[in-house]
Image: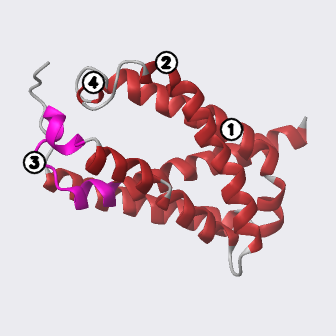
Amino acid sequence: MPTDIQATSQIYWIAALVAALIDVILVGILVWRLKKGAYRELQPALTIFSLVFWGAIYTWATYTFWDSCYQYVLPEWVRWIVVPFGLAEGLLGYLFWWISLRLPGNPLGWFFLMGGLHSLPGHLHAIYSRGLLQKCPILVGVSAASALVFGIFEFVFYWCIALIVSAFVQQISRRI
């Protein structure tokens, strides 16, 4: 299905810059407000929210962009496993939390580093194994570098949301 929308590398580089600026602000606020003890206590809320959040993100992205993009690079049956796959991705919230507490320095820095790098395996596979940037009409002409860099900052943003919501839920549950 042809579309009038056309992404470009320039748009992706600008989006990466905007996302990076938003990430710096959100990560800064989280590092300032969420101390190691409070971060350590987030595990249950973060794990549960990550499962729901990543399941929702993958479902939304698949069904929103199926006709305009994913149908060109994925078999139809993928639509049926996207929710379980997204839920499995959500388990990374627990894994990143666990690993980050065992590394030196601020665990939030490690958490967000792993969260951003989490974008690379899927995006590298889509770009180089599936030919996403050649087959998806709205992405033809977008450079792999711009898409990959944007993906890192995009995923840091998602993990910021996961931590913010988890901390909020944690505070509410304490008050109840």
User: Gap in Å between the C-alphas at discs 2 and 1?
Assistant: 22 Å
Image position, residue 92 (x, y; %): 64, 49
Q: Quadrant of the N terminus?
A: top left
Q: Which residue is mark 4?
A: 71
Q: Amino acid at mark 3?
A: Gly
Question: Neighbour class for label 2 at 10 Å: few (<14), some, many (≥20)?
Answer: few
Q: Residue at coordinates 25% horizontally, 20% vertically from top-left?
A: 67
| Magenta extent | 131-150
User: Gap in Å between the C-alphas at discs 1 and 4?
Assistant: 29 Å
Was residue 137 drawn as part of the magenta stretch in this picture? yes
Check residue 80 in the rendering and tell me which mark sits there, or answer none: 2
Q: Quadrant of the C terminus?
A: top right
Task: Looking at the image, tell me whether mark 3 or mark 2 is earlier in sequence order.
Answer: 2
Image position, residue 34 (x, y; %): 72, 63
Task: Looking at the image, tell me whether mark 3 or mark 4 is earlier in sequence order.
Answer: 4
Q: Which residue is mark 1?
A: 49
Where disc 4 sits, the SS reads helix
Q: Amino acid at mark 1?
A: Phe
Q: Point out the frontmost of discs 1 and 3.
A: 3
Check residue 7 in the rendering and tell me which mark sits there, or answer none: none
**Image quadrant assignment for residue 143:** bottom left
User: Gap in Å between the C-alphas at discs 3 and 2?
Assistant: 30 Å
Tell which of 172 and 90 is nearer to you: 90
User: Gap in Å between the C-alphas at discs 3 and 4?
Assistant: 18 Å
Image position, residue 174 (x, y; %): 89, 43
Where disc 3 sits, the SS reads loop
Q: Which residue is mark 3?
A: 141
